[in-house]
Image (cartoon, rainbow, N blue to C red):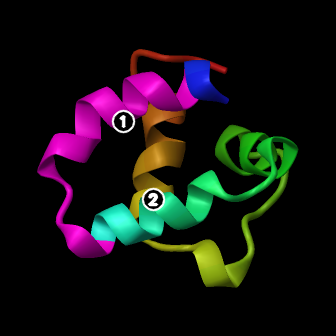
Amino acid sequence: MDLLLGPFADAHLPAFDDARLTAYEALLVCADEDLFAWISGAKPPPAALKGEVLDLLMNYFKNGSRKL
């Protein structure tokens, strides 16, 4: 996941406020296989983790320069 999350972090973390950083940190403690399934669209994310940061992450890989 480091290879996938690193480019996203480089692109987005500098502009994140404290709330977004907290939401991002909550994603980092998730199991890699779960996080991969969510950002790849293979499985829907749990309601507790849905939000702006996960949406940004999912869109980054869906529409951005990086592809899964």
Residue under label 2: 24
Asked if residue 44 is among those painted magenta in the image, a careful observer would answer: no
Residue 55 rendering spot, x and y as whole percentages:
47, 58
Q: Amino acid at mark 2?
A: Tyr
When asked about the image quadrant of residue 7, the answer is top left
Q: Amino acid at mark 1?
A: Ala
Vertical comparison of 37 with 67: above or below: below
Q: Residue at the spot x=52%, y=32% of the render?
A: 5
Residue 17 rendering spot, x and y as whole percentages:
17, 65
Magenta range: 4-19
State yes or no: discs 2 and 1 in contact (Cβ < 8 Å). Answer: yes
Residue under label 1: 9
Q: Residue at the spot x=49%, y=60% of the render?
A: 25
Magenta highlight: main SS? helix
Under circle 1, the secondary element is helix
Quadrant where the N terminus is found in the figure: top right
Q: Residue at the spot x=73%, y=58% of the render?
A: 30
How packed is label 1: few (under 14 Cα within 10 Å), some, or many (20 or more)?
Answer: some
Under circle 2, the secondary element is helix
